[in-house]
Image (tube, grey):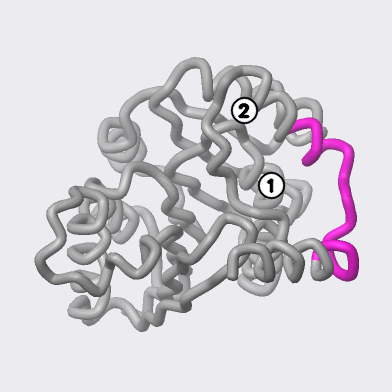
Amino acid sequence: MTETWTAVDAYLGDCLVPHDEALDAALRAGEAAGLPPISVTPHQGKLLHLIAQIQGARRILEIGTLGGYSAIWLGRALPDDGHLVTLEADPVHADVARRNLAHAGLADRTEVRLGPALDTLAALVEEAVDPFDLVFIDADKPNNPRYLEWALKLTRRGSVIVGDNVVRGGAVADAGAADPGVRGIREFLELTGRNPRLSATAVQTVGAKGYDGFSLARVIA
């Protein structure tokens, strides 16, 4: 089925997500720097862009920058006075992302913070920054439950929290999974479902990068 999914992705991209110089350059720069090829697909990037626009987001937090591909999609959804903070633990990744964001013309409204996300999230709380309208969680999956806890400290009623890669090729359904990433995602989803401050769902996806999915939650209290 992967061949079919890839063909459909190509067709949908031709129809709905045309090639873009800055985005294509970001992928090339990541590949040249040896970054893993795990950026969101163009269709998923466009979805994040549309969610941010529908939300009317002025402040966006991204947990997990990689080479800045998804940050470009999110940053382009911001108004001129909007701000994106994206968190990256790897200095090489952060450097690539900063250059890609600058090449996309977004240096004035984006900030790449370097360091383990649990530390940079704590720093944001300590700084008492304004709440974020949208949070995109796409980093190391074992820490997803902790990222959710911090996201709730950094949002307000009406904010949206998106979690990527929550299906793990179907492994998320295995209650006995030993993989730390799967266990982290299961705890993340269960915490999301139990939290009275959140109204949430999750969607399975297929495409050129295989079988996965994302969660979508709105802060309601």
Between 9 and 135, the one lying in front of the other is: 9
Range drawn in magenta:
13-26
Question: As drawn, which residue projects farthest toward the left?
Answer: 176
Give the residue type that dot 2 points to.
Ala
Between 152 and 177, the one lying in front of the other is: 177
- Say the numbered circle drawn on residue 128: none
User: Could you tell me residue 185's position as x and y percent?
Assistant: 27, 60
Q: Residue 18 colored magenta?
A: yes
Image quadrant containing the C terminus: bottom left
Using residue 117 as the reference point, say whether residue 47 is left or right of it. Answer: right
Using residue 5 as the reference point, say whether residue 94 is left or right of it. Answer: left
How crowded is the residue under tag 2: few (<14 C-alpha within 10 Å), some, or many (20+)?
many
Task: Decide whether the magenta segment is chiefly helix, strand or loop.
Answer: helix
Res. 161 visible in picture: yes
Q: Residue 68 colored magenta?
A: no
Residue depth check, mark 1 versus mark 2: number of the one nearer the observer = 2
- Say the numbered circle drawn on residue 97: 2
Residue drawn at (45%, 40%) of the image:
64
- Residue of label 1: 75
Q: Earlier in the sequence, mark 1 or mark 2?
A: 1
Residue 28 in which image quadrant: top right
As measured in the structure, the alpha-carbon distance from the residue carrying label 1 to the one carrying label 2 is 12 Å
User: Could you tell me residue 125's position as x and y percent?
Assistant: 30, 42
Image quadrant containing the N terminus: bottom right
